[in-house]
Image (spheres, rainbow, N blue to C red):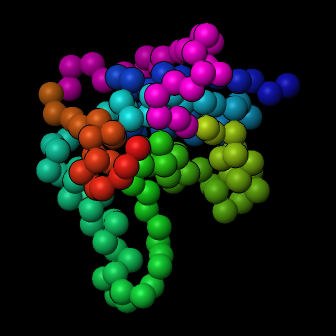
């Protein structure tokens, strides 16, 4: 029996949500993340931009014609990449688990009426500094 969980990403912290999601994926659950552009990344805006910009520029440091590694700019793909880093994605167990993750910007029509859950240990709370993935993506040049 495959369990199905829909999580609203608004007001959640990126790393904490990704760790909970990766554990649930390895247990065999299928997970849908909505509003991925509203997931928060803690830290200053300048730090977050510098970190992700450095990753994007990494492909051209050693060889400008080299096309890898690929790092995403869009918020749902940044979240998926974060979860992938917490899974053993080179093994068959990790590949199967990663295929159970879907992430969306906003709320698609098919999920408007469904019940959405929150992960209490990943909620944003009283943290002072932070940037939403959507805002970070726009700084990196993503169009969505």
Q: Nearer the viewer, residue 27 or 106?
A: 106
**Quadrant in the picture for the C terminus:** top left
Q: Main secondary structure of the magenta part?
A: loop
Q: Residue at x 74, y 34 (%)?
A: 28
Q: How far across and how far down the image is residue 35, in percent?
A: 45, 28
Region in magenta: 103-127
Answer whether residue 49 is magenta in the image: no
Q: How far across and how far down the image is residue 124, in percent?
A: 31, 24
Q: How far across and how far down the image is residue 82, in percent?
A: 46, 48
Q: Residue at x 80, y 27 (%)?
A: 2
**Quadrant in the picture for the N terminus:** top right
Answer whether residue 115 is magenta in the image: yes
Q: Nearer the viewer, residue 94 or 99?
A: 99
Residue 115: quadrant of the picture = top right
Determine whether, in the image, residue 62 is placed left or right of residue 77. left
Q: How far across and how far down the image is residue 53, in percent?
A: 27, 62
Placement of 90 over or under 99, stated as above or below: below
Q: Nearer the viewer, residue 37 or 92?
A: 37
Q: How many marks?
A: 0
Determine whether, in the image, residue 69 is placed left or right of residue 41. right
Residue found at the far right of this picture: 1
């Amino acid at each position: 029996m495959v369990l199905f969980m829909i999580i609203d990403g608004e007001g959640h912290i990126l790393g904490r949500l990704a760790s909970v999601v990766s554990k649930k994926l390895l247990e065999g659950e299928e997970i849908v993340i909505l509003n991925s552009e509203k997931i928060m990344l803690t830290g200053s805006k300048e730090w977050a931009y510098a970190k992700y910009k450095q990753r994007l520029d990494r492909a051209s440091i050693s060889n400008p014609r080299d096309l890898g590694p690929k790092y995403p700019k869009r918020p749902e793909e940044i979240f998926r990449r974060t979860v992938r880093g917490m899974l053993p994605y080179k093994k068959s167990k990790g590949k199967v688990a990663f295929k159970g993750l879907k992430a969306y910007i906003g709320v698609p029509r098919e999920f408007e009426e469904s019940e959405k859950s929150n992960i209490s240990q990943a909620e944003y709370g009283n943290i002072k500094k932070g940037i939403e993935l959507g805002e970070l993506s726009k700084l990196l040049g993503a169009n969505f």
